[in-house]
Each structure stands twice: as C-alpha cells, then as structure tokens.
Amino acid sequence: MSTSSTSNEPVVTSYALAPARTVTAGGVTYAYRELGPKGGIPVVFFVHLAATLDNWDPRIVDAIAQNRHVVTFDNRGVGASTGSVPDDVEMMADDAYTFIKALGFDTIDVFAFSLGGMVAQDLVVKHPELVRKLVLTGTGPRGGKDIDKVVGTTYWDILRATLTRSDPKEFLFFNRNATGKPAAKAFVQRLQERTIDRDQDMALKGFRTQLKAIAKYGRSAPSDLSKVTQPTLIANGDNDRMVPSVLSEDLHRRIKGSELVMYPDSGHGGIFQYHEKFAPLAAEFLAA
C-alpha cells in the first residue's frame, strides 16, 4: 500500500519541501521522499552510513530534481523505516530492490554515496536490467583495500567530534584545514534547511550493524564488476579518509568506460564541498 501523490499536485523541486511518504512491502514499511517532475526514469538516491532522509545535501538533490523524478529512501531499519538493519550489504541491496519494485519502477538511475554506493553495486550486479545509469560517490568495490578500516576511522572521528561538540561529519567528510572547515560548517547548515516533517535519527544499534556490514563487505571476495555495462560516473575527494580515494580509482578501472572525477583538497564529502561544480555535472550525466 503506497501513499503516493496524485498528478494534479504542483511539482516540488526543493528537497526541503519534498513530501514524506511510506510504502509497505515484504513486511517492511519504507519511509521515502519524492520530488521533481514525474514520468521518465526516476533517480533513486542511496544514502551513507548512519544517514537518514535528512542527510542529503539539498544543493545536489535540488539540481537533479529540476528535470528528474527523484526518490530518496530509508532502507530497512533506518530512520522512519521499520524492521531491523541487516548486517550484510547484499541483504541491504535486496531490501532496496523490494522498495524500488514496490513503487512500480522497472528502470531507475542510481545516485549513491559511500555505504549507499556499496549497496548500489550489489544491486546492479544482481539486477542489471533494473539500472540504466550509476553515479557512485565516496565509495569502493567489494573486497576493496582497507574498506574494513572504515570502522576504526569512524569511531575515532566520532570521539574527536564529541570532544569538540561538533557534528562527526565535519571530521569524517572534510579536511581539517582552511578550506575544509568552512565547507564542513556550510554543509551541516544546509542539512538543517528542512524544518517540517524531519526524519527519525539513526538508532545506535542500527549504526553498529551497518559498520559490521561494511567490515564484512571489505573482507569479501570482489564482485565481478566487468559485468557492469551501465554508464557510470565515479566521484570523490582526493583525500578520503573513510573510503580511501584510491578505491574510487580502483572502481574506475573495474567498471569499463566509467568516468572518474576527483576533487582537490577535499575528503569523503568532496562532492558536497564542490557541490557548485558537481551538482550540474551529475545532473548533466544523468540527463544525457
């Protein structure tokens, strides 16, 4: 049962105002938001570790929603979605598939960041017919070198953030220098632009389970990404401490014909620091 919109509603292109909806499938009620003009192939956003619907940068979502139907969602056990978080990335991909099919989509474009990019890769390997185009940002391949170290880096930066009363993303996503610090503050402020109908925070148990899934993914045998024939845009900062930047280059080598964009003097959140350059680039790639 979906609480989807009717066609006579005005088109919302601001993520801050995107209506909150739910759809139930496979015993799970998924929370999602949608915006942009309906019709055509939707762009489904796959979010990062510990993130909910409120963690997407509105500057990126809004740029894509100008011309495309955009869907963001909380996977099982995350934010306002029911059920418990799986401790396996492939199971997260299965849940994402269930959600996408429940909305009636046969073909989608994917925009994924970090853990979301891992889930998206597992989805496209298992269901290649579903995905037309892929945007993979701040992520790496299954079995990628040092992905399992994400756990230690994450806990260390959460501690550093707690001691300075900052948002952990300021440490995890941005360089702690003269360019990174203001970019971090600006990003965290943008995430507060939505004032109505905000999502539920990620539960600590679910966050720990996601970390376990990432560690397992990092220690797994690699997926055969030579099968990925979809046009793919890969982007990251050149100093990603969470999912090392070399893994974006690794993905680029494994996915034939993919495009790679690396932003200078930036970390895991390079696409957010450089949103003025990246948002139009991603919108153009998805439109082509």
Image: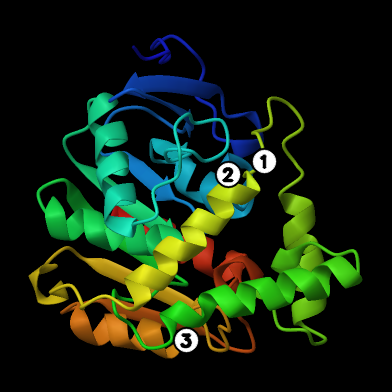
Q: Which residue is mark 1?
A: 201
Mark 2, secondary structure of its residue? loop
User: Where, by quadrant of the figure, is residue 88 drawn?
Assistant: bottom left
Residue 52 circle label = 2
- Which of the two labelled residues, at mark 1 and mark 2, occupies the earlier sequence position? 2
* Identity of the residue drawn at 42% across and 51% down: 46
Instruction: Tell which tag, 3 or 2, sits nearer the viewer.
Output: 2
* Quarter of the image where the N terminus is located: top left
* Identity of the residue drawn at 53% across and 76% down: 150
Q: CA distance from mark 1 to mark 2?
A: 7 Å
User: What's the residue type where badge 3 is placed?
Assistant: Ser
User: Where, by quadrant of the figure, is residue 200 drawn?
Assistant: top right
Marks 2 and 1: in contact by CB < 8 Å? yes
User: What's the residue type where badge 2 is placed?
Assistant: Thr
Can I make out residue 198 in this image?
A: yes
Residue 118: give x, y in percent of width and height.
Answer: 35, 64
